Image (cartoon, rainbow, N blue to C red):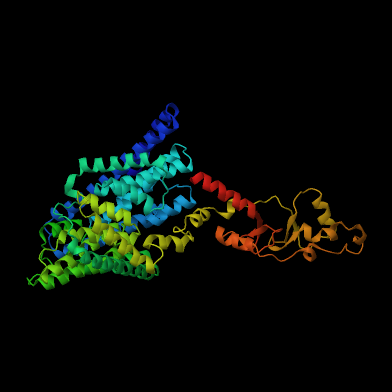
Amino acid sequence: MYRKIIKTFFTQLRYGVLLLKRRLTERQFLLLCCVIVGALASLSAIVLKLFVVKLEHFFFESSRFGDIVWYQALIPILGIGASSLLIEKVYRKNFLKGNDKIVYAIAKKSSDLPFSQCYSHIVTSGVTVGLGGSCGLESPMVATGAAIGSNLGRATFLPYKEKTLLLACGIASGISSAFGAPIAGIVFAMEVLIIDVSINSFIPLLMSSAIGALLAKIILGDNVLLTFNTIKDFDYNNIFLYVGLGLLAGCLCLFYARSFHWMEHKFAERTPVQRWLVGSILLAVLIFLFPQLFGEGYSFVKTLAETGQIPKNSILIAHTDNQWWILLFIAGIMFFKIFATGFTILGGGNGGSFAPSLVIGALLGFVVGRFFQLIGYANVPVTNFIVVGMAGMLSGLFFAPLTAIFLSAEVTNGYSLFIPLMLVAAISFFVVKSFEPLSLEMKKLSQQSELDPTDKDKFLLSRLELRFLIRKDFPAFNVNATLNDILISLHNTDKDVYAVIDDKNVLQGVIYLNDVKNILFDNAQRAEDIAISAGDLMMKQTPLTIEDDMESAILKFEKLTSAKNILPIIDKEGKWLGFISKSSILDKYRSEIIRSS
């Protein structure tokens, strides 16, 4: 029922927008679409936030078991199971999880995302996090905003460049709504999702992001958003502590990325039911020992920043006031948050690593600041270290130093920490970059699709696909075709390269006219060469395959002589599909540069 209502709403919206398209200029219409996308993406993010709040209230705050640790540990099993069931049975192949899927859609699918993405992430991630799953809502917000922008662009028949801009507007609005941080939303779209935005496109992006932050501020206020009000001014005497924090954040990011990759490998070997049972049960154990792993974790971070106190609802600290033991307990929360997030997401729940990275960074900052307080440095500003630690983890894990800096600065309602934010974000990024060339999600993208998001030229080249460049208007001769058969066919073509195939259309070789024209057209030799077949004239040539990417195709062309800049292409079974020329690849590449610029 809800699906039909949503589809009807978007259908009516489409008719209205198309009517306006006829009456507005191209620029005015694009601005209008950006405003619509920004508002819809923001409202979707707000609905998701409120959905999670309502679920938490129903299952925990209003329940007589809500404060019992074992109850909090068991309920996430239901949330992850419900999310996994929806993903596997209802949304199926149309469900795209992760920022890497958005980048892939931009590169390979003309920025087209399934319509179901506009609402499926709200339902699945809301159930996951609302019932205690230890992950974040920001990635689902980004996916929802991107889908809204993509589908509005497709529904109004906008070209690729404008459709990608609307997709970016949805992403910026989603992040802006999550934190009330419009600048961070814009930077995230450009930095994390490899979206190129020109100066002319910057104003629409600003409008969408500002609308997202405004609506979130009006509807949610400061009670749901992550904010800090106890920040102190930067003291340069603590600069070496911030350097150490940056190094620790970089090392922790490396551990997070490699641990998550290890968990992905282990869970990939199991069925969906097994993934749900293993992931949710392991998560339940962790929440029972560390109740602060329940949900996103933002409320725990805010309490820690404002009061420095931690609820003693765990059996590990229930009967102790030893500050060192409590500090070790918080360090354990920081460490096991990595695995709690992995168990939630890989077990079938829907969410992202954005919120966990902020929570882990905040806990790292608290541990470092509190450690120095306990050994006698009473003036160490722990809240400052919490905020700066968030920036360090976000920068190193997502390869997004600018997003980390501006997000952390905006949620503190001031820019007094700009220097330590820049320092820690840069150090953390440098540490991780020294060992991992790609971020956690872009590494997954590179492994699955061979896209290289770090090199703009290669990334643009990888967006092209060989199947769109195949030319089928070339002659093909059976391997047993006679010389006379070949000559008759050549009268009806202007091509100078021909495929040689067997009875099953499997490629056997290639005939280049320049190499055999003396044999073909020498009348003096015709009588004795009449028994020559196509198999005798052909040469073995390494073909392109339909699964080759553009970079490997160009490398194969480089091995040819300058006179042979055309190659056959085959499918998985070796059957001939046609020919591809090097010039067609370069022409397509040039047109792609023009389209994207």
Q: Is residue 227 above or below residue 6?
A: below
| Residue 428: image location, x then y, percent | 30, 64
**Residue visible at 34% across and 54% down in the picture:** 86
**Residue visible at 12% across and 60% down in the picture:** 67
Q: Is residue 121 left or right of residue 578?
A: left
Can residue 90 be spotted in the picture?
no
Q: Nearer the viewer, residue 248 or 553?
A: 248
Q: Most extreme residue toward the front, as rendered?
A: 237
| Residue 386: image location, x then y, percent | 19, 60
**Residue visible at 14% across and 67% down in the picture:** 370
Q: Quadrant of the N terminus?
A: top left
Can residue 579 be spotted in the picture?
yes
Q: Is residue 323 left or right of residue 40?
A: left
| Residue 98: image location, x then y, percent | 37, 56
Q: Is residue 584 left or right of residue 222?
A: right
Q: Is residue 53 above or below residue 562?
A: above
Q: How many marks?
A: 0
Q: Is residue 478 above or below residue 182?
A: below
Residue 501, quarter of picture: bottom right
| Residue 489: image location, x then y, percent | 80, 52
